[in-house]
Image: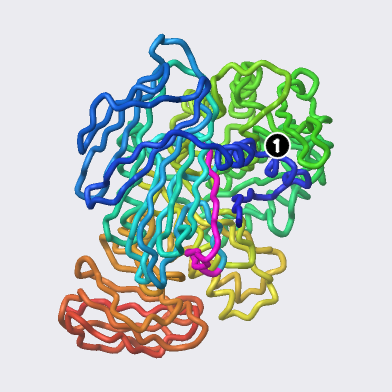
Amino acid sequence: MQVTIISGKKLHPQAALWTCALGALLAMLRIEAGTNPSFVLSLSDGTPVTMSFSAEPELAGCRAISLHPDRQSWRCSDYLLYLSVQREPSADRITFVLRSLDGYAFQLHEYGCRVAVPLESGNALWTFNREAQRDIMETGLERPWVYFSAANRGIPYLALVDRSGGNRVSLGLLEQDHIVLLRGEPGADRKNYVLTLRQTDDAMAGLFRDTIYISRDGSSWFHNARNYTRAVDSHLGFQPPSIPDAALNSTYDSWYWSLDHIDQELTWDLAKQSRSLGFKSYLIDAGWDTSDGEYVKGLKGKTGDYWPPPEKFPDFAGLIQDIQTQLGMKVMLWMQQYAMGRLSRYYGPLGYSLCSVGDPEGGNLAETPMLCPRTHAVQDHMKDLFDRILGSYRPDALWFDWQEEIPQACEASHSHQDDYFGQGYNRTQQIIHETVRRYSPDIFIDMRWPFANLNNKPYTHLWQPIDSAGDWEAMRLRAMVMRPFSAGLVMGTDEMYWDPKLPDAEVARFMAAVVFTGVPYFGPNLPAETSAHREMLRAWVAFYESNREDLVYGDFSPYGDRDRPDQLIEGQKATYIYYGNRFAGVVRLARAPRVVHVVNNSDSPGIQLTVHGLKEGKYSASVSDLTLQHRNRPVPVRLTEQAVLRFDVPVGCLLTLTPIG
């Protein structure tokens, strides 16, 4: 069995300890070994779905009280169980209510849902929880795959798709703050494929209720995930935040080449250089918060202080103010507020609030550098910490890191104030959110995969993919996987870094991928960059800033190869087509665009792409150079509704089609 654990950004050396100690995985092994009472319902197309429950006291001697096609009620020992199916055009929702007859609290170890469909050649698994590399699908279905989600990482949703990317069956939970295991595997007869969802919070209450989303709708993986997202957002009452204009700013960050070795002089110099290239925001990443080299020390270091060392930053508040006033840039501060080392000034009063987990090797409890969000002390600390930082330094935005490594199964001796991890985590997130909003409603929050998830949508404005330094294609695909879940927020990119020695055309591919993916975050080594690279970067930042409403808020769609799609964005002013994998089929537009921009981000020169949905007529065709200037004089062309765009466009350059008349 392959177990996939989604990994975090900038992992500390001890991250493997906390990741391997997931209580949910132990629960999975217990559950799979046990035998729990199961109940069968039918989807709208007749597909059977099996629900199962494990509780203490156990459910036993189950007998039906009433059985109808859309609802069932059962008496099981000291419990009443109600099951119902709500049938909708694109999905079925199965809701259960399990309560004790005497009203006393009981322990629900887990509940599960299982659905099987005939296995077809070319099927694949798709999920938010798989970290894309060179494809977005898991095609090796001959073995089981298990994915993990919780309030602070991932989304409890898994889909089986056909060879064209159409949904065959998808399975998801509407509540987002639980520990969930998702599993895909061939059936025992190898003729069916089985999806299983298990919620393993192991919680106490007198009544439990939840709803599972199952879709047999044949729409694309992208649109089905959007439908699921709408169902979740509606169920949870999510209200999209007001997005500050600064959240759309092109942003510079030096992390990938400077690491945490930054100081006031370097930060000011880089802010000036980035502003001269057109950047509107500056991210001060790890290194402002404590001494050089402390980041990698984790539990053994000073992380968690957030007091800029005077030898590095003699006037940190003044530096931020100068960047804001003299350069006219917005300033974003990096934080990993749930992490704390033993040498932090906060360890004395808060050390007892760190999470402890079972050591997977020795079996003893091991202290982690992660603060437990289920304690009053941590909740109070977050309010005080953010009050101090916002009041002292007055940043315009906050970039949150490393929350996915908070252990869900904390075994420390401190008292837990909340019934289960997700409840405490969300309570603490809400405290941070309210503290920030109270200071200024214009401060925006940036979160990155995998804790940029549906559960955290109320607490953020912008999502971005996990680290992808030196790999623009992985970054692009990772952002695409997040896109269908991001309704109400804006999508950004990782702080893209490349080797300054790369050829100009290859560097242009990095820049184009970033700008055609979301709010652009760049992180090249500016002092080491060539003048040519700097001019190219200036041009791409200017292109983004001129078209950012379209690029951020336009209708995003994947097209082409199922496993490695390209993408297009249909905005109000123009349509933007990313041509990366030389798709030989037809790209279908939802509406006729005013202007068309096609970037050749493939590995060879020339574009040959069939596009349907154009407005028939005359166009001016312009091909750019690497600085996005006209390579030659624009030429008139006549295009029909479906036309083959065949132009000599160099790698990393733009084709622009503008209507004439």
From the image, which quarter does the N terminus lie in? bottom right
- Residue 209 vs 532, above or below: the answer is above
Magenta-colored span: 134-150
Depth check, front residue: 431 or 313: 431
Residue sitting at x 37%, y 42%: 50
**Residue 434 located left or right of residue 524:** left
From the image, which quarter does the C terminus lie in? bottom left
Does the rendering let one see residue 142?
yes
- Residue 469 vs 178, above or below: the answer is below
Does the rendering let one see residue 439?
no
Q: Position of residue 612 (x, y in %)?
A: 22, 77
Residue sitting at x 67%, y 40%: 319
Q: Position of residue 201 (x, y in %)?
A: 53, 31
Q: To which residue does mark 1 refer?
A: 316
Q: Position of residue 637 (x, y in %)?
A: 24, 88
Residue 349 sits in quarter? top right
Whether residue 193 is in magenta: the answer is no
Whether residue 146 is in magenta: the answer is yes
Residue sitting at x 26%, y 47%: 43
Depth check, front residue: 25 or 322: 25
**Residue 581 located left or right of residue 69:** right
Q: Position of residue 484 (x, y in %)?
A: 38, 53
